Image (tube, grey):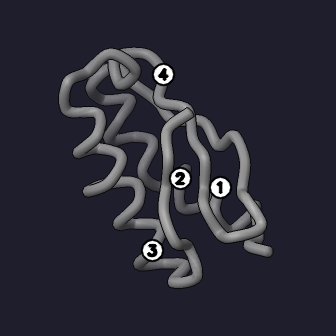
Amino acid sequence: MLDRTKIQEVIDRVRPFLQRDGGDVQLVDVTEDNIVKVKLVGACGSCPMSTMTLKGGIEAELKKNIPEVKAVEAV
């Protein structure tokens, strides 16, 4: 199982970029098969670019720092 603390640290490094645009991200769950579930809130919750933010930003950063992460999904 992945370390939630380490995942949260990476998310905290990404968070200022989201907050700058009026959004944010919350860690919801980490599954046994290494899928990180997050909730995009604020402007990120309704932004048409949220999928790109999720995959190209949050998921890419998590995979770079924690290679065991298989995917990041919005819930």
**Distance between the Cα atoms at labels 1 and 4?**
16 Å
In the picture, the disc for residue 11 is 2
- What amino acid type should be assigned to the residue bearing mark 4? Val
CB-based contact (under 8 Å), mark 3 and mark 1: no
**Residue farthest along the bottom direction in this orientation:** 67
N-terminal of the pair, mark 3 or mark 4, is: 4
**Residue farthest along the front direction in this orientation:** 33
Pick the front one: 63 or 11: 63
CB-based contact (under 8 Å), mark 1 and mark 2: yes
Where residue 72 appears, x then y in whole percent? 49, 55
Kindly identify which residue carries mark 1: 8
In the picture, the disc for residue 44 is none
Kindly identify which residue carries mark 3: 63
N-terminal of the pair, mark 1 or mark 4, is: 1
User: Looking at the image, is mark 3 or mark 1 nearer the viewer?
Assistant: 3
Kindly identify which residue carries mark 4: 41
Where residue 59 appears, x then y in whole percent? 41, 60
CB-based contact (under 8 Å), mark 4 and mark 2: no
